[in-house]
Amino acid sequence: MSKAAIYSRFSTDLQNERSCEDQIDLCKTFAQREGFKIVEAYHDKAKSGASLHGRDGIQKMLQDARAGRFEVIIVEALDRLSRDMEDMAGIYKQMQFLGIKIVTVHEGEANTLSVGMRSIFAQLFREDNVHKVRRGMTGLVKQGLTAGGRAYGYRPDPGNRGKPVIVEEEAEIARYIFTAYEAGTSPRAICKRLNSQHVKPPRGKLWSPSAIIGADERGSGLLRNPIYVGRIVWNKNRMIKDPLTGRRVSRSNPRDEWLSVAAPELRIIHDELFDAVQAQLAARSVKRDDISKQRRPQRLLSGLLKCASCGSGMAINGADKSGKPRLKCSAHTNSGACPDPKSFYITDVEALVIDSLTRELATPTQIHTYAKAYLEKRNEEALQEGRRRKEIEARLSEIEKDNERLLDLILKNLGDPNTLSARMKAQGDERDRLNEELCTLPQTKAILVHPAAVKRFAEKLIGYRPKLELALNMLDDMGELPRLIREIIKSITVGRDENGVLSITVENWLEPFLGGEDAPKKPPRGWGDVKLVAGGRIELPTSGL
């Protein structure tokens, strides 16, 4: 008897929970009739067939297929395996290579023709469902209802599904923001005032300039939302699935595809104020082309500096009387959110960081020790990052599935709309946070520093150590210093100790295996001692401003 595996799947929680069990029972009856010996049954419950990502059942089946555990795969129909043409063709091609047959209960053994035709029909059916949902949402908008999401200053009306009502307390805040911005107040100053008064923002804990300004091409941001002048605009963005990761990503739609419907009962501000704000937004905006031209960092350590008080980034903000630039916490500058803001001289920070690395990478032996330690550390971190990436992707898949179910309930007028909308909103916030975290996780195979890069950096600095300024100037002229610094340094935390002394912690990509208790101590260099600490960090205390 040929050894066979059964695979079953159903798409959403709206379907019968016993759907997989019913499919398996049907396949077992078929296997008994055809003389197959069932060795395993795999299933994916409430999983979309649009992608193989996030489907543990089919991934385990494909893994066991490569291990030779069975010779036949039995399914009720081919669309249980996938509703994507590429995935279905790939599965069939893999099984052909392994000599494994795919057999359906109603049509028998799959072949090139049946796989091609069925996968086309399955994908068309899935895409048609998407169009039907969008058509339903378009109908809601044309009736003056919202199709999801909640703008600041409004809440759902319990007695009128899909119809928002004005929240007067929040509406007053929205009026203040529009009026203050039109009068010339910067978004940072607006955020500082709102945060100091403990005004609750639309999402998160603190107001930020991005929540107020948003992005023109996406139509996002409080100041760009036409709902405040009584117009509901929908279809500004669309969600598409990345075929490589299975994650949904947002894309902007052309403005001629946006749908605008009048809703005068939702007006909070007058047209003249809104138009004046839009004109100022256009005048103050920085074009993406202008940003992309700034390829080189403005400063040697740009993007690497962090505030010791709150962990936010730090940037140049102002200068002293002599013109020496000062470094300040961006969170404090943008919204006044830093609990203990401090200012520092950027030139002092740069000199200390470079000098510490120059002194640490002193000999070829130390260079190779650092490189070996780095590779071992990165391999360990890669495993942890890979596990976290899988956890996030699994949760994102769950959120996508649940939000699709909730949207279907709203469209069918089932359940309490306020509860459903609140749950979709909460899960949308969680999805955004997870996507942001996912973007910060490097690919597990990516190696950020190579031994050759470390050696190259050290070789260029060795020999110039007595004259640090000369080394900096030479490497900067060669255009290599910023790039090499970013290969070595992960982050730099700047703060002060209890005595008010400037304390700088450099977290590098290398593990400091140099020297134990018997290693010779490095002498002070006039502005502070260099001390290695656990975790690949270098602490540099020095005099304050």
Image (tube, rainbow, N blue to C red):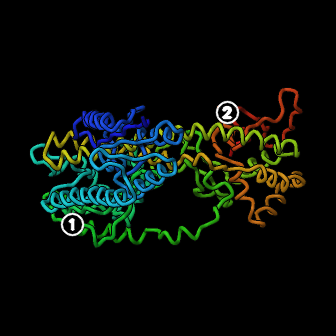
Q: In percent of the image, x 49 and y 69: which residue is there?
A: 288
Judge from the rendering whether residue 438 lies leftward or rightward of residue 257; answer left or right: right
User: Does 222 sit above or below residue 444?
Assistant: below
Rounded to the nearest angstrom, the CA distance separating label 2 from label 1 is 59 Å
Tell which tag, 2 or 1, sits nearer the viewer: 1
Q: Nearer the viewer, residue 77 or 386?
A: 77
Front-most of 179 and 450?
A: 450
Q: At x 83% / y 45%, what residue is drawn?
A: 367
Relative to 30, 507 lies left or right: right
Q: Is residue 201 above or below residue 219?
A: above
Q: Secondary structure at mark 2?
A: loop
Residue type pointed to by label 2? Asn
List the residue tagged with mark 1: 260
- Residue at point 65% right, 46% down? 490
The residue at which mark 2 appears reads as 499
Quadrant containing the N terminus is top left
